[in-house]
Structures are given as C-alpha cells and as structure tokens.
Amino acid sequence: SIHLKSKQSISKCHVAAVADSKAGNILGITMSKPVRNRHDPQGHAEWQLMCKYGRGIDKIYIARFSKAGNNSCKIDPCPMCKGLADRLEITIVSLTNDGE
C-alpha cells in the first residue's frame, strides 16, 4: 500500500552533517530526511543546517554512511546546496573513513 511504501526509505545510505561556527563551536548536527523527490534539497542535511544557522556557519562537514553504518563513501553537495553555501560563504567538507 502507499502508506507502507511511504515508511520505507529507498535510500541505501544516510547522510550526516555537522555545522561549525567561525569561532570553532558546533552549531548543529543533523541527518538527511526522506522527501518525495530526492532532488529536493530540503531533505539534505547540509541544507537544513544552512537554513537554520545561515551566515553563522563557517564549515559544514558531511559524510555518507551505509545503513549498516560501517562504510562511508565520498559525497559532494548537490548544485543547489553548493550554491546556497557559496552565497552564505560556507565551506562544505566531505568526510570518508579513508581520510579523504
């Protein structure tokens, strides 16, 4: 049924993001949220932080993990998130478990 399908995530990964202030303090931590259209940035973890903390952010660290939580892989912000970060003068840093 549609109700059951809406509860199932089609994503194979989770994305986490941490926002640091210019003073080096953690402003917020969030995870990506499911949205109907995966290209809708409102579900993106970095977008949520930028909307909440705006110009108070210096850097956002993002990481993508498998649902099991044991693997990470490189992730880059989508063009809309990158565009908003550029306008707000925020650096987005992608983290992986191999040190990249």
Image: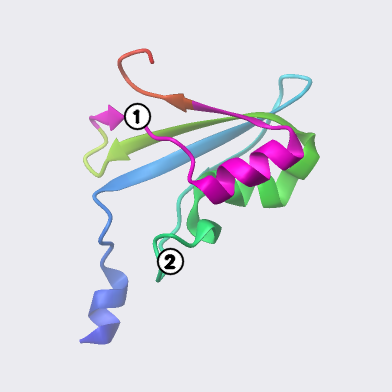
Label 1: how many Cα within 10 Å (few below 14, some 14–19, many 20+): some
Q: Please indicate whether residue 32 sits to the left or right of residue 53 in the image.
A: left
Residue at 77% in and 23% down: 22
Magenta segment boundaries in residue numbering? 70-93
Tell me the distance, in whole angstroms, between the alpha carbons under discs 2 and 1. Answer: 21 Å
Instruction: Give the labeled residue for mark 1.
Output: 74
Q: Nearer the viewer, mark 2 or mark 1?
A: 1
Q: Is residue 82 magenta?
A: yes
Q: Quadrant of residue 56?
A: top right
Looking at the rendered structure, the kind of residue marked 2 is Val
Residue closest to the eye, 56 or 38: 38
Residue closest to the eye, 57 or 70: 57
* Residue 34: percent from left, percent from top: 40, 62
Residue at 38% in and 15% down: 100
Label 2: how many Cα within 10 Å (few below 14, some 14–19, many 20+): some
* Residue 16: percent from left, percent from top: 45, 39
Q: Is residue 88 magenta?
A: yes
Residue at 74% in and 33% down: 89
Q: Check the picture and name the quadrant holding the N terminus.
A: bottom left
Looking at the rendered structure, the kind of residue marked 1 is Lys
Instruction: Give the labeled residue for mark 2.
Output: 35
